[in-house]
Structures are given as structure tokens and as C-alpha cells.
Amino acid sequence: MKFESKHWNLFSEIAKAIALSLLIVLLTINSPALAATSEVLPLPLPEFKGKIGLTYKDSQPDFPQTISAPSNAPNVLLVILDDVGFGQASTFGGPVDTPNLTRLAETGLRYNQFHTTALCSPTRAALLTGRNHHSVNTGVVEELATGYPGYTTVLPKSAATVAEILRQNGYNTAAFGKWHNTPDFETSAAGPFDRWPTGLGFEYFYGFLGGDTNQWSPALVENTKRIDKPNKPDYHLTPDLVDHAIAWIRNQQSIAPEKPFFAYLATGATHAPHHAPKEWIEKYKGKFDQGWDKLREETFARQKQLGVIPANAQLTPRPQELPAWDSLSAEQQKLYAHMAEVFAGFLGHTDYEVGRLINAVDQLGELDNTLVIYVVGDNGASAEGGLTGSVNELQVFNGVPENLQQLLAAYNDLGSPKTFNHFPAAWAWAVSSPFQWTKQIASHFGGTRNPLVISWGANIKDQGGIRSQFHHVIDITPTILEVAGITVPKEVNGVKQQPIEGTSLAYTFDNPDAPSHRETQYFEMLGNRAIYHEGWIAAARHGRLPWERTAKGNFDTDKWELYNISEDFSEANNLAKANPKKLEKLQKLFLKEAQKHNVLPLDDRLAERFDVKIRPNLTRGRTTFTYYPGTVGIPEGSAPNLKNRSFTITANVEIPENGAEGVILTQGGRFAGWSFFLEDGKPTYIYNYANTARYTIQSPEKLPVGKSTIRFNFDYDGGVGAGGIGKLFINDQLLAEGRVDKTIAYRLALDETFDVGRDTGTPVVDTYQVPFAFTGNLQQVSLDLK
């Protein structure tokens, strides 16, 4: 048959239309698989392919197909611990038995050149987004945010989390434990909630929002609601987190076994307070009597034996700022050894609990199909306890000194609900073997080198292998996406995305000798800085020590060091004088990377940045506040700031015939705070100065039956952390007056809250037990700031 040109054109158009229709059908049928290749999220709903007639009888329905994860996409279990040094877990040669971590390592891979940012929030922001911490505005922890682009702590919508990407590609997602990526000024019940876990890709969250929490009495949040801790004897947070994670995974797999899950477990352990069950602490009795110098040598020897450090690695010396163990008195050695026992019990207990979660996944038959990524610490071990350790971390933050007698008096309470304890800085250095320094010190590997274990069933052929490619926490998100077969999106929820700055580690799974795909990486934290490039690293440690509150360095005179880490694993041989040209080249590269990633301006302040007044605040500009019963769980970043100023509390109450008791208004708890309450019917104000002194002002008379107005006036002396005069009034009659000698200057709590009508945390004074709810009719409470 002969076709004329016009017929061919018509035939061509018809063919194109048929082909296009077939393509649309195929796209609709296969849309779940195509979700993994989409650069724009969310995927648009497919076109309706049914038929619409006059009635349902001559119509044909067509439901939009649900999005499915790519074929064979594994479950993902991402675990991160807190404040663990490179040489702490036995899996990497440390003194603390971690059999469950070792089990994963023996069926997977151990990475010995993996790095974090040297501090909590920044590491987590980089972990979950695949971008450098300053690139996503988290150059420092939430509680120290400033108004500079790299330091606002406001995660940008242009950096979608791995959870959001997985969720929109067919995964169920949940997070358990420490979050610490919501701005300090956005963590109240007023939100906004788009930077809480459930606003950043996690369908379920159970944990806490702040930097640390009391393991015995945590400030818990479920999704976006603050909740009370479970009423269980011997409650501890870590088992509770694992219980919730296990329950969520079991439910998810029971209901949708074909759908993969992404579970993120971020323990509060082993950040201070070092809270551990007594039986776990006792397992390590006497294990640290040899002291930190000897322990470090023992750890170094085990690390070489295990092969987690090269045979030619050198053990770096103790910094001159830390004391030799032999220089301590016998009572100091006894106390400090016990502090290390407490920490070891804390880590051992944590490993056991993570093991329960691994076992639960295994019992479901899903362990071989689960990519387990276990980051052993979000930075190096913490030296924030100072040279002597602490029984109350808030004393360190507020510059309140602790003497040896106070520490010894708390010996038997260490690890219990009665302390908010932290071990001495020298232990942190010891368990960062073989590297220099600790947490906060981003210039050296003691602050940034953390163990990493990856396990994935039979997909890891070289089981028990060690990988030495240079990598960073920003590389975890691209690893997960590559293994899941999901394309990195260029647009999410209508927002163009910043480039992923990490690179996947998947190439290392089958190739132990592959050259590292990460050639350059900058480090910066609180003025400490370094730059890695092609086997070399230049490092500048800034002046302030991790346990000091005030800056004392000079950026212009900081001494830079140079190491060839391709030959010098532990940064033991400073080549700055021998190779000044290489050092100068790397210094220029650091400045280039710093400008590129919003690292500037460098900022070494600490105490000043704890002040909530320097950040956005729901209370800013207000001097009068009115609260009603049931208003509880207001974090410090969203509560009225009563520090360093005069104020008045006024409560309108109605007392029944049988009297009343309970909390009217409180903030903080056992380790610092204040409470205004009725004790045996008497209005009482108690100020707790960092658990070292309590100042009580109490009415000698009970409140009368019926309606009354109670008022507490505080006239502040002026200055920072000073005292003042407190006066108590009932119905405008002055009934009590007293002096508060000292007040907290910077931060009352990281986890305790501001509560009306009851106490949701720990008690400010042990004469009452929480929640100590008000038993009369509390009509309202007002606050006036002066």
C-alpha cells in the first residue's frame, strides 16, 4: 500500500499518541519503582485512568497507586551513641565490654578513619542531612545559637533529611532518643513543629529534644506532646527507648511486612549525667584502679592487637594541662577510679540494650535484610567534667566550683538519681586513645574520630573486615540512599535542595583497598579547626579548654600543626616546621572551605552564648505573663527569663476546708532551680543554687480557707549571678522575708522545665515528691519582670 506524505504524517502522529499512552500506563503501573529515581518529591498523583459515566454503573474506578520503596530496598537501622571516645568500647580495644557491638562488627565492617564534628547537634544535623554542619546552620549546639548564617541552628528546608527522603520513597520512619536538632527557642508546646522530628520526616518520635536529660527522670516527648515518664520501679531511659523501638518495628512489620523501615536510635547514653543501674557499675569495680595513664597504654596495645590501628601507629602523650595519675592523692585516685567505673557501667548497659534491639530485628527474620549503621559516639569522649569531675554538670556550665570534699561526699551516689555526674577530663583523654584531645576539640582526632560499624547480612562479604578510607558523618545519608536505590532529590516539598556534600561509603563494602572517595574535609568547633586534604591534615587548637567557660585564645596567633596521616595515623609527628609550604597551602584551603560552608565568623565564646536573651524567644519584649493550671513542660528557651533580674510572682488560689498543698510555679529541679509551693498549707519559696545551697523563704502562717492572693517579690542586687531579697505576701500582708545569696547566672537546666500547678521533673527540694500537684483551686499565676 502506498501512502502519501500527509498519510504518513497522520500515521506518525497516531503512533506517537499510542506510544505516549502506553508510556503513561507503564509509568502508572510502575510508579512505585519510579519513586526511587525521581528528583522531585513528593511524586505527583498519577492521572485518573478509569472511566467517568453518568452513574457508577457505566463508570470504572481507578485508585492512585501507593508509593513503594525500590525493589529489594533494605530496612535501615541507624544507631548513634553520645560522647564515646575512639578507645572506649572493647570492639575497638577499649576497657568496656561491648559484645553486641562486636557481634555486628564480626558480621560486618569496622571503620577506623570515620569522623564526626566534635559536638552533639552539629554531628546529628550532618548525619541526617548529608551536608556539613555549618551548611545547614548548625555550627554549634542548639543552646549556643547566634544570628550568623552557619550558627542559627535552624535546619533549612533546602536540606531535607534522609528520613524525609525515605518516607517519600515508601519507607516507614521513626526516631527514638536524643534529638537535639530543634532550635532551643522552638521546643515549647507552641512550636512551631516543622523542625521537630515529626516535621522532618519521622512518622513517629519518642525521646527528648534537648542536649541531655536525666536518665532516671527524663523530659520525654512523644511526637509533639510532652509526656510523663512511665511509672515503673527502677525506671531508666535507655531500656524505655529500646522498648519503644522494638514495639514500633514489630507493629510495622506485622502490618506492612513488605514495606521497609528506617529506625533511628540515638541514645542519651553516654552523655552526662552518667546514670547507670548499680549492678552494671559493680561489674567494673577495680577495673580502673591503674589510672588513666596506664589505661591508655593498655588500650593502645589492645588496639594494635585487634588491628583497629596500624602497627606503626604511635601513642600521643598526655597534654600538659591534664595531671598525671601518680600526682594524685589516694582519695582522689579512689574517687576518680569510681567515676570511671560508673561511666563504664553506663556504656556496658547501653551496649546490652542496643543488643536487645538487634535481637528483636533478628527474631523477626529481618536482620540479614537490614542495613545496620552504628556510629559509636557523636564526638570524642567528653572532658566537660573538668579536672576533678563533677556531681552536677550545671555547676560546670554556670562556673560554680566544686571541691574535693563535695565530690567525696557524693561517692556512693554517683550514677544514681541523686547526682548529675561527669568523670574527670583525663579519663576522656585516656579513652580517646591513641589520639590527642577530646570532645569539642575539632582540631584533633580525639574530638572527631569515632568508631563506625556497618553490618548488612550476606551483602557484606568481608565479614569482620576493617576499612581505613577517610570518611565523615556527612557520608552516612548518601550511603543509605545508594544502598536503598533512591536518587538524591533536587526538589523536596517545593524547595530546591542544597547539594549533598557527603559521599557514599558503599564502594568500600567489597573493596578494602579502594582509595578514599573523600579527599577534602574541614573541621571547626568553637574556634578549634582543621582541614584534611589527600592524606594531610592541618590543625589549630584554639585556647579555651573543654571545661573552661571563657574564651582566652587569639585566632591570629593560634599555632597550626601539620600531619601526614597517611603515614602517621594518630597525629603524633608535627611537620609544620619541616614543611611550611604544605601548611600554608592547607591554611588557605581551610579559609576557602570556611567561606564556602558558612563557618565564618569564628566564635570561641561559650558562657555568653548560653544566655537565652541573645536568641529569638516567645517571651521577648514581654514583662507580664499569665499562666493557668496544666501549663507544664515549658523549656528554658521559651520560658520567662528570671535570671539576673527582679520579678514578682502572684497566684490567685482558693483553699478548701481541709487545706491544700502542692506546687504553684516551678522551674528547674534537683540540680538547679526554684519552686513556689504550699508546704503544710504555708506559702514557700525555695531557691536551689546548683544543689550546693538552698535558700528558703516561708510564711509562718497557713493560707486561710477560701480565696487568697499570694505574692512573692524578688529584689535583685544587680550584676550577674548575684543574690537578692525575697518577700512573701498573703493578701498584701508581708509575712516572710529572706535573702538568696547567689543565683544561677546562665542556665538553670538543659532538660528540666517551667511548670504551673505541678512539677514534671525532679523536685527542687526533697521535702516533696513530684509531681506534688496543687490540691486547692489554682485559678491563675502571673509573673511580672522588672
Image (cartoon, rainbow, N blue to C red):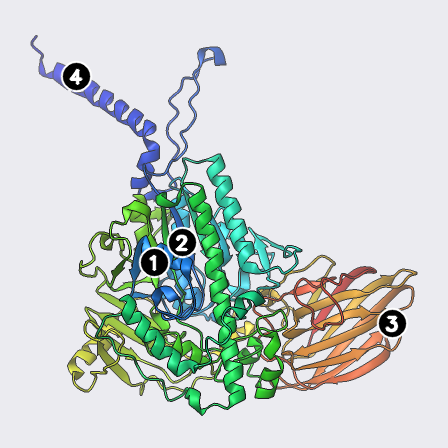
Give how far apart the Cα atoms at labels 3 and 2 are.
58 Å
The residue indicated by pointer 3 is 731
Tell me the quadrant of the picture where the C terminus can be found.
bottom right
Looking at numbered disc 3 in the image, what kind of residue is underneath it? Asn
Give how far apart the Cα atoms at labels 2 and 4 are.
56 Å
Give how far apart the Cα atoms at labels 4 and 1 are.
60 Å
Horizontal placement of 361 versus 36: left or right?
A: right
CB atoms at circles 1 and 2 under 8 Å apart? no
Which residue is at 55% across, 50% downward? 223
Looking at numbered disc 2 in the image, what kind of residue is underneath it? Leu
Which residue is at 32% across, 47% downward? 457
Along the polypeptide, which appears first: circle 2 or circle 4? 4
Q: Nearer the viewer, mark 1 or mark 2?
A: 1
Which residue is at 48% across, 80% downward? 424
Q: Observer-nearest residue: 568 or 188?
A: 568
Residue 582 position within the rendered picture, expressed as x and y whole percent measured from the top left: 17, 78
Residue 773 position within the rendered picture, expressed as x and y whole percent measured from the top left: 76, 61
CB atoms at circles 4 and 3 under 8 Å apart? no
Mark 3 nearby-residue class (10 Å; few <14, some 14–19, many ≥20)? few
Looking at numbered disc 1 in the image, what kind of residue is underneath it? Val
In the drawing, what numbered circle is on residue 11? 4
Give how far apart the Cα atoms at labels 1 and 2 are.
10 Å
Q: Nearer the viewer, mark 1 or mark 3?
A: 1
Along the polypeptide, which appears first: circle 1 or circle 3? 1
Q: Observer-nearest residue: 18 or 765?
A: 765
Q: Nearer the viewer, mark 4 or mark 3?
A: 3
